Amino acid sequence: MDRIKERALLFDIYGNLLTEHQRKIYSDVVENDFSLSEIGEEIGISRQGVHDAVKRIDKILAEYEEKLHFAENYQKNIETIDKIKHEIDVLSENGADTSKIGKLIDKLSEDL
């Protein structure tokens, strides 16, 4: 997984465990794609201060993932769902009625 997607996923999963200040900084970096200088000006700290905060937050989120593995399990579930969808497509091509299974898989995907 590339770094941008990994950061976004970890923030989605563990972001509520951060302080409000940390969430604001990380949200601006990851979701809003603001520069470190822009964030620093907005919250009244130096660009280097923002950089250091982002590095600390990256480490915090990585530690949560190392202990809890929610992002890893999420990725595995997505891969499994994709494989199931492929198998449903094969069954459907062979004439099987897979509409109910397809709806359940779609619901499961939405719930993740």
Image: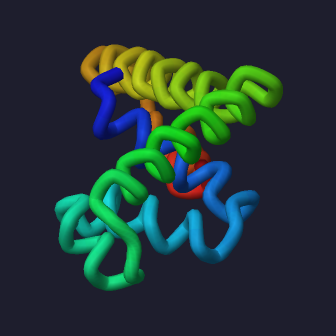
Picture coordinates of residue 71, whole percent (x, y): 60, 32
Left or right relative to 75: residue 91: left
Residue 45 sits in quarter: bottom left
Residue placed at 26% from the left, 79% from the top?
41
Indicate how the structure is coloured in the image. Answer: rainbow
Left or right relative to 89: residue 72: right
In the image, residue 84 sits, relative to residue 14, either above or below, namely above
Residue placed at 62% from the left, 58% from the top?
15
Residue 61 sits in quarter: top right
- Specify the quadrant that holds the N terminus: top left
| Res 95 visible | no
In the image, residue 8 sits, relative to residue 87, either above or below, namely below
In the image, residue 3 sits, relative to residue 90, either above or below, namely below
Is 47 or 34 nearer to us in this picture? 47
Residue placed at 47% from the left, 21% from the top?
79
Picture coordinates of residue 62, whole percent (x, y): 61, 30
Is 55 or 96 nearer to us in this picture? 55
Is 7 or 44 nearer to us in this picture? 44
Left or right relative to 63: residue 95: left
Is 14 or 48 nearer to us in this picture? 48
| Res 89 visible | yes
Picture coordinates of residue 74, whole percent (x, y): 60, 33
- Circle count: 0
Task: Give the residue furthest to the right.
Answer: 67
Residue placed at 66% from the left, 25% from the top?
73
